[in-house]
Image (cartoon, rainbow, N blue to C red):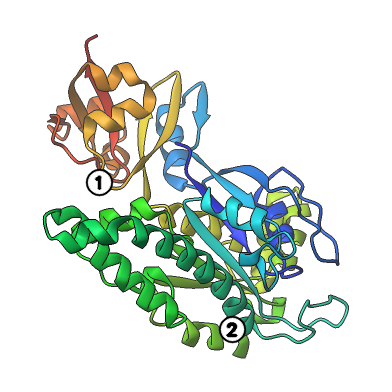
Amino acid sequence: MALKCGIVGLPNVGKSTLFNCLSNAKAQSANFPFCTIEPNVGVITVPDERINKLAELVIPDKIQPTTIEIVDIAGLVKGASKGEGLGNKFLANIRETDAIIHVLRCFEDENITHVDETINPVRDKETIDIELQLKDLETIESRVKKVEKLAQTGKDRDAKVEFVLLKKIIEILEQGKSARELELDKEETVLMKSFQLLTAKPILYACNVDEASIQGGNDYVEAVREAVKNEQAEVMVISAQAEAEIAELEDIEERQEFLEDLGITVSGVNKLIQKAYDLLELETYFTAGKIEVRAWTYKKGTKAPQAAGVIHTDFEKGFIRAEVIKYDDFVSLGSETAVKEAGKMAVEGKEYVVQDGDIMHFRFNV
């Protein structure tokens, strides 16, 4: 499933350091602007204890977790919407992603320069917001010209609905807000997706803090929370430097000791990957057999035939039924055979909406 999260932010906020922790692909990390020019793409394994538990019970020859793509995008500067710096490349790269992780610098360090000299994550957020909003405004105003005449005749209902939504978007963008802040009905939501607006993409704000602020955050983080409270967005705290140090430790016990010293049980990177997965509205189902225990990614709300198609298009075309076991039932009873004997395996048809954690076996004929 080719859904991607883009990591964005101003230069020198810790984007590439964080990307290095997320991926085996090593983005260059240095103390000067535009270190990242071409977007680095990393295929990231999604941590999920459920696949390990299933493997313990099934003892397969192979374990295959699910993955997502993370893209490290070049740092942006003021004027990007007009092509300043690497603006055009930056905006084009964002448009190709499905969700955004916006890294904000929330720590002091005189050895790491800031493009605006002082530390102010809310100002940094607004710098990028403005550029994305200006680009979206340009996109929407161009679209308005195409549908306005059709909408005004009153004969084309679709054009009228679109025109009304376009005017709403223009109004909110001119207020210095993002398109994702609009409350939309189902029809408008579908339309909004077709516009591919930069400020309509789901977003996670990753506040990059020093090690001392990992547990409780700091004043910078609280300022960010206040600034985004009306957005449909989440804020998380992570220390890119601490995560880089953790990534250098090969021994699992040493990593765990490091986490305990920081006062946390799960690394920020693992949390970030899971939040990125959620941001993309993705869920996981499993197939479990002696040859392989595997996690498969699908979009929330997907029905059984389309979920089968994730494995192979033939599975979807010739779908007959799905045999479904709930994860908790499999774990508590210990095997597929025990689940069947207990009458806990369900047989589902084409209208079944797959649930996160389902263990599935598809019957098909082509």
- Residue 200 visible from this viewpoint: no
Q: Is residue 308 left or right of residue 83?
A: left
Nearest to N terminus: mark 1 or mark 2:
2
What amino acid is at disc 1? Gly
Q: Residue at x 30, y 48 (%)?
A: 300
Residue 172 is situated, as x and y percent measured from the top left of the image, at 38, 77
Decide: is 279 above or below 113. above
Instruction: Specify the farthest residue to the top.
Output: 366
The mark found on residue 122 in the picture is: 2
Give 2 or 141, whichever is nearer the viewer: 141
Number of callouts: 2
- Residue 106 visible from this viewpoint: yes
What amino acid is at disc 2? Val
Task: Give the alpha-carbon distance from disc 1 to disc 2, as whole Å.
Answer: 35 Å
Q: Is residue 237 left or right of residue 310?
A: right
Give 161 or 326, whichever is nearer the viewer: 161
Q: Which residue is mark 1?
A: 301
Q: Nearer the viewer, mark 1 or mark 2?
A: 2
The mark found on residue 80 in the picture is: none
Q: Is residue 316 left or right of residue 20?
A: left
Q: Residue at x 71, y 77 (%)?
A: 210
Label 1 sits on a secondary structure element that is loop
Label 2 sits on a secondary structure element that is helix
Residue 99 is situated, as x and y percent measured from the top left of the image, at 48, 56
